[in-house]
Image (cartoon, helix red, strand yellow):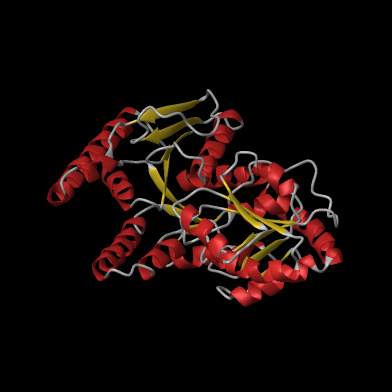
Amino acid sequence: MRIVFLHHANVCRGGIERVFCQKANYLAEQKEWQVTMLTYEQNGEPYPYELSPKVDCVNLDVRLYSAYQAPVLLRPFRRWQLCRQLLLALRRFLAMHKTDVVVCTDKDAHEQQALLMAHTTERLVVEAHTGMIDHVFCQREETNTFRRMVAAWGVWSLKRTIARFDALVALTPDDARCWSPLVTTVCLPNALAFYPAQTVTPTADVRRVIAVGRLNRQKGFDLLLQAWAGVEAAHPDWQLDIFGDGEDRDALNLQVQMLALRRAAIHPATPDIYDAYMQSSFLVCSSRWESFGLILIEAMSCGLPVVSFDCDNGPRNIITHGTDGLLARNGDVADLTAKICQLIESPALRCAMSVEARQQAARYRKETVLRQYAQFYTSVIS
């Protein structure tokens, strides 16, 4: 069987890049399928995650981002030219390589449209790593009327395009319900990078709360810092460490100063995040919305309970409230403060939740999840 994973570029250490590399390695090594990682904006950059030598890497060299380097009035025309180049490049590639399944993501509608126009007999699968909720929230939060109209048109175009695919993979049951009226939909989660052999040992000596994610509005770290002001007042011996990179770093550091927080720090993203999990007591997720929540299952696999906003739509599909974590009312800073303090003040509850979190995370072990994906890809062509 020959399968192609299409993504504009594999250059950053993101979730899509990681899971595509995971699947490519598994299918090439364990299933001995012919696997190709197909990009068009790689530009000679190395892949951020290790790939098996059995996986082919092909770059079509169509630099769509360069459209934004053109004068403003010429950008639509330049973008049309580049999308046309992408269509022709995909058509040539698929004509030369007999492919059974092509997998792309729900991130870029132009990519999906080009693929639909280029394909012949290949089965087309879109994986909703972004999720319907992300597209809708980005539209709702746009304050400029014109840009909001453009965003609304983008969501409509995305739905119309994906409806023509053979199947869609949603990461959570909630997201699957959003897509199922449009296209044949299955629900398969992301997989853990690995399942640690050892877990944290809850102890009174460890007084650290960890948060992880991109420093942007979606992740809600501004709300977490507001909540932490109340936590720090009640428990000045506890530390909050946030790990991540992004456009809001300066604003968040300024917020730490404005709130006079002495026990909160923002650190760069680290490839050794599991080491950071192992030195923490529990994780907090303050996202305004989530399509899945990879950091939740990572932390839980290390035996960390999770306190999270009950946001649409990932956390509630992973966390069982009161068993392996606590869900705070979405966007309610006071309730988030209360839930964090509840875990701080209840060592016995933390210990019990640690055991449950570890057990629940076992559902996302790499071997289990990737086997499910292989079965799904096989079913698509049969």
Q: Residue at x 47, y 47 (%)?
A: 380
> Picture coordinates of residue 371 (x, y %)?
62, 43
Q: Is residue 191 left or right of residue 159?
A: right
Q: Nearer the viewer, residue 198 or 270?
A: 270
Q: In the image, what residue occupies the spot 34% across and 36% down?
A: 41
Residue 33 x, y percent position in the rendering: 52, 31
Residue 147's spot in the image, x, y percent? 27, 64
Residue drawn at x 55%, y 73% is 331
- Describe residue 129's horizontal placement relative to residue 350 as left or right: left
Q: Nearer the viewer, residue 170 or 196?
A: 196
Residue 368 vertical placement versus 296 (above, below): above
Q: Quadrant of residue 173?
A: bottom right
Q: Where is residue 232? Give x, y as percent.
A: 70, 66
Closest to the observer, 355 or 261: 261
> Could you tell whether 192 is left or right of 185 in the image?
right
**Image: 336 above or below 200:** below
Q: How many marks?
A: 0
Above-or-below relation of 331 to 134: below
**Is residue 148 at all visible to an observer of this figure?**
yes
Can I make out residue 129 in this image? no
Q: Farthest top residue?
A: 53
Q: Residue at x 60, y 43 (%)?
A: 370
- Position above or below: 211 against 4: below
